[in-house]
């Protein structure tokens, strides 16, 4: 009897924001049994429903460029991957893609791309133009680590939100995933700066990256409880053959789902996407993520001819319900599991938008 109730106690303690020993959480995370997954997901759905009802917010995801100066060991866009043909959308292509999505009803867009040193002016221009043409739509950027001045310029130009996953809450483990030129401290500094500039901030991490332990994943929860980002992106690690981690195993779908549920319990009002990586790793990953407590889906609005070029991991899904042309089907799939695809901006509840 003790054993049966103990996982429930642990999860309920977490939901009540009581401190839970990391070893207890790590034990659940290490072996996500069906009972644990279902109980955690049930609690997570209850919590999400209190703040968001059954809404799942849609964001148009635009992959603006796969040119990248960084060398993250897990990512297919890393500069050292010479096999990849590189592309960069023009200002007009970016704006047209957003306008197309806007025409379909989307009111929230994410411009994501490699980390480039020459993007400050072009993106500032895009942001200003975006805001003048689509003034009631939210603009999110996800363009890696940049200088404080650059983040400030983009914010002034109109960007509302910024996604920069911290990738690992554990400094040692962060170091195992990135070259020496990148640092955990700089990453956290970027997140702090973004938050000070008034961006709604997204942090996040992959599940199942090399050398990650269940204890590291338990640390994620404590880290996020302190950082309190407005958004949290969580997806399984999926190998890319032209990276140093090309031969490493894929992260577990079950563990990813459990982490989504646990993060929902820790940050009840967070915007948590059911990610493309989850949908790539599992046929019905999008719905599974939502049923685990996620409340955002990001259909791809990148012009079709560029999509294959944004291969951060092998086999990445970018068509069908993962894309803007599958919007109706996506809404139908969400409807079947009891959720409503929402076209609202979907700001964090604590952010008042004028
Ligand atoms: N250059 C931007 C965007 C990176 S892509 C930035 O640095 O923020 C967005 C996210 O995809 C990354 O933060 C990472 O967590 C995830 N990602 C990258 N490679 C991956 C892989 N091989 N498997 C799963 N997710 C991956």
Image (cartoon, grey):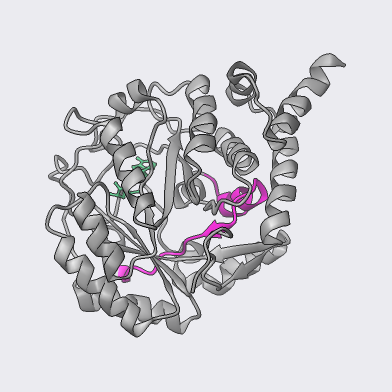
Q: Residue 87 placed where, x, y %?
A: 18, 61
At x 22% / y 79%, what residue is drawn?
A: 92
Q: In this view, does 338 lie above or below 181?
A: below
Q: In this view, does 310 lie to the left or right of 267?
A: left
Q: Is residue 261 above or below residue 92?
A: above
Displayed-image quarter of ligand 1: top left
On screen, residue 333 above or below 189: below
Instruction: Answer with left or right where residue 95 lies relative to residue 349.
Output: left
The quadrant holding residue 310 is bottom left
Residue ranking furthest to the right: 1
163 falls in the magenta region: no
Q: Can residue 89 be seen in this view?
A: no
Q: Give the range drawn in magenta.
A: 282-304
Q: Is residue 285 magenta?
A: yes
Residue 289 in the image: state x and y as whole percent: 59, 49
Q: Where is residue 300 in the image (x, y as percent from the top left)?
A: 41, 64
* Foreground pick, 39 / 46: 46
Query: Residue at the spot x=58%, y=60% of the render?
Result: 349
Name the foreground residue: 222 vs 113.
222
The residue lying at 40 percent from left, 39 percent from top is: 238
Q: Residue at x 58, y 42 (%)?
A: 260
Of residue 113 and residue 166, the one placed in the foreground of this image is 166
Please state, as top left, top right, bottom left or bottom right, where the N terminus lies in the image. Answer: top right
User: Is residue 137 at least partly visible in the picture?
Assistant: yes
Residue 281: give x, y in percent of width and height: 49, 44
């Amino acid at each position: 009897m003790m054993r049966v109730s103990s996982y429930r106690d642990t999860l309920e303690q977490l939901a009540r924001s009581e401190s839970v020993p990391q070893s207890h959480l790590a034990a659940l995370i290490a072996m996500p049994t069906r009972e644990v997954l279902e109980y955690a997901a049930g609690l997570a759905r209850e919590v999400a429903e209190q703040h968001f009802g059954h809404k799942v917010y849609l964001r148009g995801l635009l992959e603006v460029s796969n040119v990248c100066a960084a060398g993250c060991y897990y990512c297919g866009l890393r500069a050292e991957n010479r096999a990849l043909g590189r592309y960069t959308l023009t200002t007009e292509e970016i704006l047209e893609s957003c306008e197309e999505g806007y025409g379909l009803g989307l009111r929230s867009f994410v411009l994501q791309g490699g980390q480039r040193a020459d993007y400050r002016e072009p993106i500032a221009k895009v942001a200003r133009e975006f805001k003048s043409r689509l003034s009631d739509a939210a603009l999110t950027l996800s363009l890696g680590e940049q200088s404080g001045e650059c983040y400030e310029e983009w914010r002034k130009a109109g960007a509302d939100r910024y996604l920069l996953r911290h990738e690992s809450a554990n400094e040692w483990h962060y170091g195992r995933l990135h070259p020496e030129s990148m640092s955990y401290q700089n990453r956290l500094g970027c997140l702090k700066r973004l938050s000070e500039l008034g961006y709604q901030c997204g942090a996040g991490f992959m599940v199942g990256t090399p050398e990650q332990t269940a204890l590291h994943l338990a640390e994620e929860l404590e880290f996020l409880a302190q950082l309190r980002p407005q958004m949290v992106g969580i997806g399984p690690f999926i190998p890319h053959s032209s990276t140093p981690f090309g031969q490493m195993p894929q992260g577990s779908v079950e563990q990813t789902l459990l982490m989504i549920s646990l993060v929902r319990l820790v940050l009840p009002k967070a915007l948590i996407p059911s990610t493309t990586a989850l949908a790539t790793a599992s046929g019905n990953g999008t719905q599974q993520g939502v049923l685990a407590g996620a409340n955002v889906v990001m259909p791809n609005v990148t012009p079709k001819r560029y999509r294959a070029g944004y291969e951060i991991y092998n086999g990445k899904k970018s068509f069908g319900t993962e894309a803007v042309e599958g919007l109706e089907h996506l809404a139908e799939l969400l409807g079947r599991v009891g959720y409503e695809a929402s076209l609202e901006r979907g700001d964090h509840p604590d952010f008042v938008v004028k």
